[in-house]
Image (cartoon, rainbow, N blue to C red):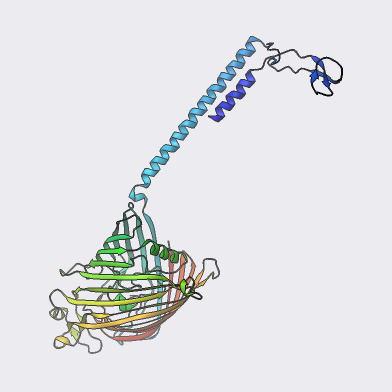
Amino acid sequence: MTLSKLTLAMATALSAGASYNSYAMDLYVDTKTKQIFAEPGLGRELMGSFEQVTPKNGYSKHDGTHHGSDNELTSENAEIQTIKQDLELKENEIKALKESVVSTREERAKNDEKWFNKINVRGYTQLRYNQPISGDRVPGEDPELRSVGDGGIKNNGSFTFRRVRLVFSGDINDYVSLYLQPDFASSVASDIDNQNFAQLRDAYADLAFDKKHEYRIRAGQSKVPFGWENLQSSQNRLSLDRNDALNSAVPSERDLGLMAYWTPEHVQKLWKDLSKKGLKTSGDYGILGLGVYNGQGLNRNETNDDLYVVAHSTYPIELGFLGYPFTGQVLEVGADYINGQFDVPTGDMTVFDTKAKLKGDDIADTKPSGGVREERYAVHAILFPQPFGLQAEWNWGKGAALNPEGNDGKGSIERRGLSGGYVQAMYKIDHVFRDDGVLIPYVKWQTYRGAWKGANNSPYTKVDEVEAGVEYQIMKALEVTLAYSTMDRTNVRNLGQASGDMVRAQVQWNY
């Protein structure tokens, strides 16, 4: 080691000295050649008298004589040997430390390769408050305003947990990733409407064919790629609830099956760049996607041998080529399609307007074997708010729906048309009170005419709603949303058409 050699050299230099006799000497310098002489001469000037310095050990490097005792030399040699031994010990210690560091790094690298050391945990919680300020709200006396998107919209609703989510995700290796998400704010249907039960939302693995993950298959329970807002996480969505028109195609947005996605690397980068800007994308579900799934709904058993098929397409277009004011703007457009046989779950129901009591068994007798064919088409266009943005979707098709007057007034399941969608405008304001504070006011209009297959008997619904609100992202960990909504909705429990105005608020914390 460099330190050891230097120390040994110093020790050797120190041990090389011996005592010598000091004496005085006159020295002369030649005024022309500047040479130094011990005797006077022509052209030489006296410099002065100089006395030779004697080291402690009595050794003079000039005459090589020794004046120290043998005991002193023996003591000095012992000291040198001690120094050498200390240096050897230090060298061994440093060597051992190096080996320990290398071993620790190798062990850590091995541990990093283990999949359970790559799992990330994150989540979010939404605490919501809904307060009706006018309209239908007393069950029995009127239809009672209810929403399929939020069970907290009802008489005496007040505070509810809308979502309590934990997400476990990570890469097992370069080709296999996992994703697991339970929700702890699910309800269980009963007479007292129990809340806050755990429910599985997502459980899937992404199987990639390349390290860039441009081509991959998603296996398990995951979101069905139909619609744009359906795919957007509730953690990121601006409005409080998803629109009914497209969400009715896949209530709870998820099902069990296989999905294949293709996302070119440059599109992956663009979506990531938009997210870094604080813009709310729908996530990476490919610019093209194809899939097959059960089609009977989230956490429901398959009840027929038919599989739903889904085709998904979307593409973000940078509008900078149009010049100002489109510099930096991104427009995403796409279209989707689903087709499959839906086996409608049936149950007893009392129709609010006619007070007719429909029996689930009578309704079930009208179902075709294997279910009713559902077929839908959808289109979407999203201009990301930089600072102004627009978001619009529409879908149409046919599917299973309840006709309460069919089957001689006993109720029947029939194939009926459906259509609907929404338009949303928003404006993004950055640096509100804080560098990371973001304020986004928005207005959303939606309409839908068609079945809601997430409820028993797949009731035919009519929905018209306008919501105006503002989301304040105080920081990445905390968001607050205030909204005013005017609604006209079919109560899926009794087919009563109810309307009213709501003041709504939500606090969301991310972790």
Furthest toward the bottom, the residue is: 354
Q: Is residue 246 above or below residue 285?
A: below
Q: Is residue 505 above or below residue 274?
A: below
In percent of the image, x 61 and y 20: which residue is there? 12
Q: Is residue 302 above or below residue 168?
A: below
Q: Position of residue 191 (x, y in %)?
A: 26, 74
How many discs mark residues in the rendered view?
0
Left or right of 63 on screen, residue 337: left
Quadrant assignment, res 289: bottom left
Q: Position of residue 450 (x, y in %)?
A: 26, 82
**193 and 315: which one is in front?**
315
Q: In this view of the protein, can residue 138 be seen by the observer?
A: no
Q: In this view of the protein, can residue 88 be seen by the observer?
A: yes
**37 and 208: which one is in front?**
37
Left or right of 313 on screen, residue 407: left
Q: Position of residue 210 (x, y in %)?
A: 32, 55
Left or right of 17 on screen, residue 454: left
**193 and 488: which one is in front?**
488
| The C terminus lies in quadrant | bottom left
Quadrant assignment, res 156: bottom left
In percent of the image, x 59 and y 27: which residue is there? 6
In percent of the image, x 34 and y 58: which residue is there? 213
Q: Position of residue 393 (x, y in %)?
A: 35, 78
